[in-house]
Image (cartoon, helix red, strand yellow):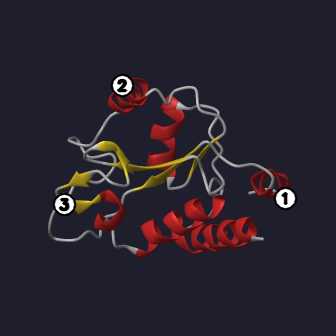
Amino acid sequence: MTPNDQLQLNYFKPELVVIPCGSRKLDRPARAADLYTGSYHRACRKAADALRPDRLLILSARYGLLDLDDVVEPYDTPHGATDAVTSQLILDQATSRGIMLLDPVLALGGARHVGLVHSVWPHALTPLTGTRGIGEQMARLAALRNGAAN
C-alpha cells in the first residue's frame, strides 16, 4: 500500500467492504458474523469495522456474498476449489442485491478473494495487494484498523 493509498483510506468512508471467509469455523450453523473464527478473518473484520462502511459483506467460498446476519452451515471449500463460488455467481448476487454501483468499494483478502471482488467491482481498492505474505498482510490490516480509528 502506498502512502497515497493510506491517505485515501483515511479520508473516505467506503460504501462497501468485502472481507474473506476463513478456513477455521465453528462446527455448527451460525451467523456469518460468528461462523469464521480464524485470526486472519478476524483481523480483516476489525479493519473493516474501523472503516465504518455503509455495508460489510463476507465473501464465502461456498455461499458467495454473505451479510453478517446470514445463518449458514460450516463447510470445507477453499476459494479456487472446483465446487467454490464463481465470479458469475458473485456478479448475480451483487446484481440481485442492487449493490453493483456502490463506490468506493474496498476488498480485504488474498489474491483469489480480491480477484473475485474485482470481477464484480473492477474499481475496488485493495490495500493488501503487493504484500509478501501473511505477516505483512496482518501488519497492513492493523495499520488500517489503527489509522481508521484516528
Q: Position of residue 148 (x, y in %)?
A: 72, 65
Task: Select label 1 or label 3 by which is in front.
Answer: 3
Q: Relative to 6, is 38 above or below?
A: below
Mark 2 neighbour density, 10 Å: few (under 14) some (14–19) many (20 or more): some
At x 43%, y 75%, the residue is: 39
Eyeballing the image, is 92 above or below 74?
above
Q: Secondary structure at mark 3?
A: loop
How many angstroms separate mark 2 from mark 1 (CA)? 35 Å
Q: Which residue is mark 3?
A: 74
Q: Image quadrant for the C terminus? A: bottom right
Distance of label 1 from label 3 (alpha carbons): 38 Å
| Count of numbered badges drawn on the protein | 3
The residue under the point 78% across, 57% down is 10
Q: Amino acid at mark 1?
A: Pro
Q: Position of residue 13 (x, y in %)?
A: 70, 49
Query: Position of 113 compared to 21: left or right?
Result: right
Q: What crowding class fits label 1: few (fewer than 14 Cα within 10 Å), some (14-19), or many (20 or more)? A: few
Q: Are marks 2 and 1 in contact (CB under 8 Å)?
A: no
Q: Nearer the viewer, residue 124 or 55?
A: 55
Amino acid type of the residue tagged 3 in the rendering: Pro
Q: Quadrant of residue 7?
A: bottom right
Q: Nearer the viewer, residue 90 or 102?
A: 102
Q: Which residue is tagged 1?
A: 3
Which marked residue is nearer to the observer: mark 2 or mark 1?
2
- Secondary structure, mark 1, is helix
**Percent x, y of residue 47:** 59, 65
Of mark 1 and mark 3, the one earlier in the sequence is 1
Report the Cα–Cα distance between label 2 and label 3: 23 Å
Amino acid at circle 2: Asp
Q: Which mark is residue 92?
A: 2
Query: Residue 43: horizontal and vertical position, in percent?
Result: 51, 70
